[in-house]
Amino acid sequence: MYTSKRNVLETVALLKAHGINRIVLSPGSRNAPLIQCFISDPFFDCMSIIDERSAAYLALGLSLESGAPVVLCCTSGSALLNYAPALAEAYYQQVPLIVLTADRSQAWINQMDGQTLPQPGIFGPLVKLSVQLPEVMDETSLWQCNRLVNEAILTCQRSGKGPVHLNIPLSEPLFDFSVPTLPDVRLILDNHPTEFTLPEALKERWQQAGKRLILVGQSPSDPALSKVLDNLSSRCDCVILGEYLSNLDSKSLIGNFDNILNLANAQASDALQPDLLVTIGGHIVSKRIKQWLRAQSNLEHWDVSTTDRLTDTYQHLSQRITASPISVLAALPEDKPTKTTETYAALWDRLSASLPAPQPKTLPFSDLSVTGSLLNLLPAGASLLVGNSSPIRNVQYYPKPTLKAVYGNRGTNGIEGSLSLATGLSLHNPSPLYVLLGDLSFIHDLSGLWTAQQSNNLRIFLINNGGGGIFHHINGLDLSPNLQSYVAANHQQQLDAWIKAAGFDYLKAGNHEELSAALAAFTDPNRTTSTVLEVFTNPDANKHAVTHYLSTLKNALS
């Protein structure tokens, strides 16, 4: 049986009509009418997660893995505030989440009634659309409710996917479950034309540009994009840059560009500067390349995306091309270089090849060396989730292995929710998911360990360096002894007790020999239980390892 609340019936029936069936519920009484409808219909696949913050990151993982919208549903009051971090991440990663928040009657907001706060629009610019559903009293309000729900569902899946918020006021009584079936509803669908023709003016400008650079940000794994980029580089003199999170396997991809820019002298840096920058995908981790491109005086920038959002990251935006990146790249005209001197692409390739990757066992036992040891042993085709701060930067020192997909919360760069996201990614994928995290990311989402018990294919590589490792690479932190505790959050905790209590297998390593033995067990394809490998490093060795590695390269670009 279903609730008698007509705005709830309309919402649930439209979700079903649009084929959206994954529902992540959190307990509560105000959202009981919604819960009752979802669990009463076998079409819906429901999960109950107590912690709303963890629930939201889990939903984020489910949607990332499936590509389909996932519904979040919570009670009124402070419960929905816990969705905010994951919604911010979903907004910047363009992940379709549908947030249903139950609310009190508007008459009781700000009147000292229990669990009340102003919920409409509470997520501000972090959602693509926020709507306040009416409490349905007549045909007009029913029509309005239907239109708003349709609009929200379509918006989350339109070009530039992202989260939407439906706030649903529900007056008492809440527990009238007397309706036998969901109603017939009016279904509204989008049409998406696929034809694309690159304007002749842009084709001409592409051919006129002497030095062309394509920068690929965070993107889902797409072999077709890698193929198009390989084809483009064979037809044209152009450079393709991307990080692990670009998820590219293009043979033409240059991933160590941050080191190139760091070590290049002024003359080389000038020669590397593009005339035309083409960007696709989302966020770039490297702060250095952002600053380098922003500092250029004459740069033309095309941003190619299917989103509706205008983003001028590099402060030179001149063309916003709203189309599929694959269609745009495939339409760029051929322009094979006829010069006998070194081409722009050849210059980048030569400099990239001159910078060898670190050799883990020749470095001090450190964040940098253990990261390389893990990457060198990852099985071909594995999936990898990389935590923020030091881990996402350290992987970039190494060539990207052949991976199925690389994930990371770079939409907002926060350390929270990584374990819950990993669980969401792993629940509907039987293959092992490798997770590279720092200790603070792990500690921040300890409640996610409880949720993670539902998965047996997590392989968590936990680097415990006694605090926020990235802060030890920032000049000035050592000027005050108090900053170590308050900024880097230094600690001396070993995390085995929490890990074992959650039912995970536990391994540990504190030197190269122990790590080699532990990694063999950690990456064993016959392992059938979720496992955490805790690796202990220290800040001094971490800083020294990076300094030592870069010092060996300092003359490579001269």
Image (cartoon, rainbow, N blue to C red):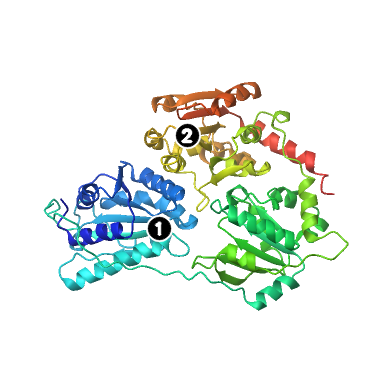
Q: Which residue lies furthest to the right in this view?
A: 340
- Circles 1 and 2, Cβ within 8 Å, touching? The answer is no
Q: As rendered, which of 256 and 548 lies closer to the eye?
A: 256
Numbered badge on residue 107: none
Count how many numbered circles sit on residues in the image: 2
Quadrant assignment, res 312: bottom right
The residue type indicated by label 2 comes to Leu
Left or right side of 430 for 131: left
Q: Which residue lies furthest to the bottom in this view?
A: 201
Residue 306: percent from the left, percent from the top?
52, 65
Image vertical order of residue 67 relative to residue 334, above or below = above
Residue 166, by quadrant, is bottom left
Where is residue 205? Give x, y as percent: 70, 74
Q: Where does label 1 land, which residue?
A: 163
Q: Horizontal placement of 441 versus 150: left or right?
A: right
The one nearer the camera, 245 or 438, is 245
Taking depth in this image into account, of 368 and 240 the one nearest to the observer is 240
> Residue at left 19%, top 64%?
135
Q: Where does label 2 land, which residue?
A: 458
Return the residue nearer the eye: 453 or 17.
17
Q: Is mark 2 on a helix, strand or loop?
A: strand
Residue 43 in view in this figure:
yes
In the rendered image of this protein, does residue 3 appear above or below residue 441? below
Q: Where is residue 242? Give x, y as percent.
A: 64, 53
Please, what is the three-letter code of the amino acid marked with disc 1? Answer: Pro
Q: Where is residue 139 in the image (x, y as percent from the top left)?
A: 17, 72
